[in-house]
Every structure is written in structure tokens, then in C-alpha cells.
């Protein structure tokens, strides 16, 4: 079995059934996934962790329904899928197969939707076709890939946390986040409401932000592992790569929405898979854990945040000047109200969201005074 990067052989792997248990040889070290250890003693574990990062987790909602539809289990399904992804160009190739990247690339050839039929539309059928990006899509929430107008589209539920009360709260928040990012002129993945066929359920859909089979999304965790930079150090590492303004926009955006789950896998950059050169900061995605979604007095007081500093106010201190325009808080609240009505989110949760927004803007007002003071001080020195 070979780990492939588009048409490049990267490493020859030792397999035990559907699991890889060793590295026989490195064929092209330059094309190894970002963040893989260069030390022989830890390289295999590092590669296994990377592979696990692009897999269905055991904590996935409706995992029992998924397992029931996969006679051989998830590991067998991953093997049959060749671990092809929509968001990078890595895949696993059996040494005996004549298949090429052009043959398996989902962006060119499309993919089967058996998995989505089971995981999203809850059909009681076995999965027969395994050429699907679902086996390399992580995350806890119930989800599945389909195509809309020939565009790869992820359908995602959002019933999570103590305040969901049977509604897809995080899906609604994704839609809100997309509209607010647009108002701030921040590159983002657009989320839109989708009614699940045959039900009254409203969930969200989003198109894949990688649009061809020639680019890789490299996430923050990979850079953290590559450079051994975590927390504040990861912020400075990305800044040195030329992405400071993008990070500052992300921090301010997450601050006003109080996104509590911008972990290291939820941001990064896009690179050319052939030259390995970075192209741009990736559009923001997966912002639904926001607007007091997990509200309790304790959580609101501590101001939980990620990825650089764990407190809402402290993380904002990384930003030295306002990097973008801020939406009027009343506009933000109006977007929340309109979206929550579409998703059937209770009025009480709207009030919690507004309270969380107000708190964020109060912190920003204090920070803006400091930014203005610093600017005036520099002018006086000049």
C-alpha cells in the first residue's frame, strides 16, 4: 500500500488487514503531510494521528446507524474508499491497482451518496458504494456529503448542547456566522438553511471550499505539530507566514460571536499540492459553536475561547489594531432573529445570544479605546 499525494508516491506502508501498522520506506519525504514527525521513532505514530484526524470519530452522532450500514465497519469502508478526501489530495493506493489520481479525484469524478442516504436522510439501507468523502470527514455532528448543482455540499445537523432542545441550534448559528462574516468582508464558507427531505427539520448546507483536485487545506494543528508551536506561539507562527491580518480578523469575528470552538483544525491555509507553496488563508468555516450555544452562568463568566488563549477578553489582546469593519450590534441581532425564526429556535435562546453579543461588544469598546489611545500616542511621538 502506498500513501499518495496526487500522483506522487510518498511512502510505502505495511498493512495488517485494513490497518496500516508500519512504514516500509519513505519515497518522497517532501510530499509527506505537513506535521508528520521527521524522526523515525515517532513517524508512524504521527502518521496514524494524521490519518485519524481525517476519519469519522467514534463520538459521531448516529454512529450506530452508520455502523449498521457498514457491514465491514468504518476501517473496512476507509480502505475501500482509498481514503480520498475533498479537502486535500492525499489517498491510499493498493500496489496492485492501476488507478491514478485522475481516476479517484472526487472533484473531477463525483462521488457516491450512499453514506448521506444513511447518515442524513436516515434510510435503512446498506452502503454499497464506498467512493465517498464521508470517510475522511471528521467531527462529532451528524453530517453527510451530497452534490447540489454538481457542487460538493456538506449537510450538517446542529443539535448539540443543553440549549438545543431538539432544534439544530448550531446549524442556525452557522448561517448567522456566514452572514456576519460577509458584512465584515471576511473570506468565509457560506452556510444556508436546508430542510431535510420528508421531515420538518432545518439543517445547514455548505459547499466545499476546496474547489479542485489540485490544492490541499493545511490546518493549524498540522502547523502546530510541524513547528511545535501552540497557543500564543501558534498565533506568532502564522503571523510570520504572512497571515496576521487574517488571524486578527478571525479573532475579532470569533470574539463578537463568542465562538468557543475555533480549535486548531478549524482554520489554516490552502496550498498548491504540486508546488507545495501556500496560496491563501482558508475561508473561515465551522463557526456554529457560538452565541451562547452552551450558556450557563459559569461559562458566560469565564468567556471560554480558542485557539490561542482560552479566555475571550485575553485572546482579544493579541490584536493590536482593528483589522476590519464591525457590524452594528443591532444588525447582528436582527440576523440572529431572522435566522432563528427559520430554524424554530426558541425566544429564550435568542435572548441568550443577544446577551452574549452585548458582552462581546462591551469588551470591544474598551479595547477600541486602547487602540485609539495607542494611535494618538504614536502620532504625538511622530
Image: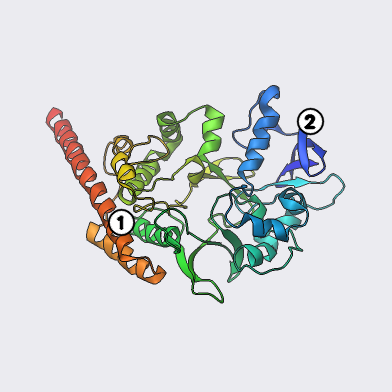
Query: At x 82% / y 39%, what residue is drawn?
Result: 16
Q: Does the rendering let one see residue 2? A: yes
Q: Does the rendering let one see residue 32? A: no
Q: Give the left or right position of residue 178, taking residue 375 as reference.
A: right
Query: At x 45% / y 63%, what residue is drawn?
Result: 166
Q: Is residue 257 above or below residue 278?
A: below
Disc 2 versus disc 1: nearer the observer = 1
Of residue 299 and residue 234, the one placed in the foreground of this image is: 299
Of residue 138 and residue 299, the one placed in the foreground of this image is: 299
Residue on which the image places disc 2: 25
Residue 356 horizontal/vertical position (percent): 28, 51
SS of the residue at dot 2? strand
Q: Quadrant of residue 42?
A: top right
Where residue 182 is drawn, which disc sits there?
Answer: none
Mark 2 neighbour class, 10 Å CA radius: few under 14, some 14 to 19, many 20 or more: few
Query: At x 56% / y 36%, what residue is drawn?
Result: 222
Q: Is residue 3 above or below residue 228?
A: below
Q: Give the left or right position of residue 324, taking residue 189 as reference.
A: left
Q: Give the left or right position of residue 54, taking residue 189 as reference.
A: right
Residue on which the image places disc 1: 353
Q: Is residue 159 above or below residue 267?
A: below
Marks 2 and 1 close (CB-CB < 8 Å) = no
SS of the residue at dot 1? helix
Of residue 165 and residue 135, the one placed in the foreground of this image is: 165
Quarter of the image for the N terminus: give it: top right
Q: CA distance from mark 2 to mark 1?
A: 53 Å
Amino acid at each position: 500500500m502506498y500513501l499518495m499525494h496526487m500522483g506522487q508516491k510518498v511512502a510505502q506502508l505495511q498493512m495488517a488487514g485494513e490497518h496500516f501498522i508500519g512504514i516500509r520506506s519513505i519515497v518522497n519525504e517532501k510530499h509527506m503531510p505537513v506535521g508528520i514527525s521527521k524522526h523515525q521513532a515517532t513517524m508512524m505514530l504521527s502518521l496514524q494521528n494524521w490519518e485519524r484526524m481525517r476519519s469519522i470519530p467514534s463520538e459521531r452522532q448516529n454512529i450506530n446507524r452508520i455502523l449498521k450500514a457498514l457491514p465491514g465497519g468504518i476501517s473496512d469502508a476507509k480502505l475501500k474508499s482509498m481514503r480520498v478526501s475533498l479537502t486535500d489530495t492525499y489517498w491510499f493506493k493498493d500496489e496492485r491497482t492501476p488507478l491514478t489520481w485522475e481516476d479517484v479525484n472526487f472533484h473531477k469524478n463525483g462521488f457516491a451518496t450512499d453514506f448521506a442516504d444513511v447518515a442524513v436522510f436516515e434510510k435503512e439501507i446498506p452502503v454499497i458504494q464506498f467512493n465517498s468523502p464521508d470517510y475522511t470527514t471528521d467531527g462529532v455532528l451528524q453530517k453527510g456529503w451530497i452534490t447540489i448543482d454538481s457542487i460538493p455540499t456538506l449537510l450538517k445537523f446542529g443539535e448539540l448542547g443543553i440549549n438545543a432542545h431538539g432544534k439544530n441550534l448550531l446549524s442556525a448559528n452557522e448561517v448567522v456566522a456566514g452572514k456576519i462574516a460577509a458584512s465584515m468582508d471576511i473570506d468565509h464558507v457560506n452556510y444556508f438553511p436546508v430542510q431535510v427531505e420528508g421531515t420538518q427539520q432545518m439543517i445547514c448546507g455548505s459547499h466545499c471550499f476546496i474547489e479542485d483536485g489540485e490544492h490541499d487545506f493545511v490546518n493549524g494543528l498540522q502547523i502546530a505539530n510541524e513547528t511545535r508551536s501552540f497557543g500564543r506561539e501558534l498565533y506568532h507562527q502564522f503571523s510570520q507566514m504572512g497571515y496576521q491580518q487574517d488571524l486578527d480578523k478571525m479573532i475579532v469575528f470569533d470574539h463578537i460571536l463568542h465562538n468557543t470552538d475555533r480549535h486548531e483544525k478549524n482554520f489554516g491555509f490552502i496550498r498548491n499540492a504540486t508546488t507545495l507553496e501556500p496560496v491563501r488563508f482558508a475561508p473561515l468555516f465551522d463557526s456554529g459553536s457560538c452565541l451562547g450555544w452552551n450558556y450557563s452562568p459559569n461559562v458566560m463568566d469565564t468567556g471560554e475561547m480558542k485557539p490561542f488563549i482560552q479566555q475571550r477578553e485575553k485572546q482579544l489582546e493579541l490584536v493590536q489594531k482593528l483589522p476590519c469593519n464591525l457590524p452594528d450590534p443591532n444588525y447582528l441581532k436582527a440576523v440572529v432573529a431572522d435566522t432563528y425564526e427559520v430554524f424554530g429556535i426558541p425566544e429564550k435562546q435568542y435572548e441568550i445570544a443577544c446577551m452574549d453579543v452585548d458582552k462581546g461588544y462591551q469588551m470591544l469598546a474598551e479595547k477600541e479605546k486602547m487602540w485609539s489611545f495607542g494611535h494618538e500616542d504614536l502620532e504625538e511621538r511622530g
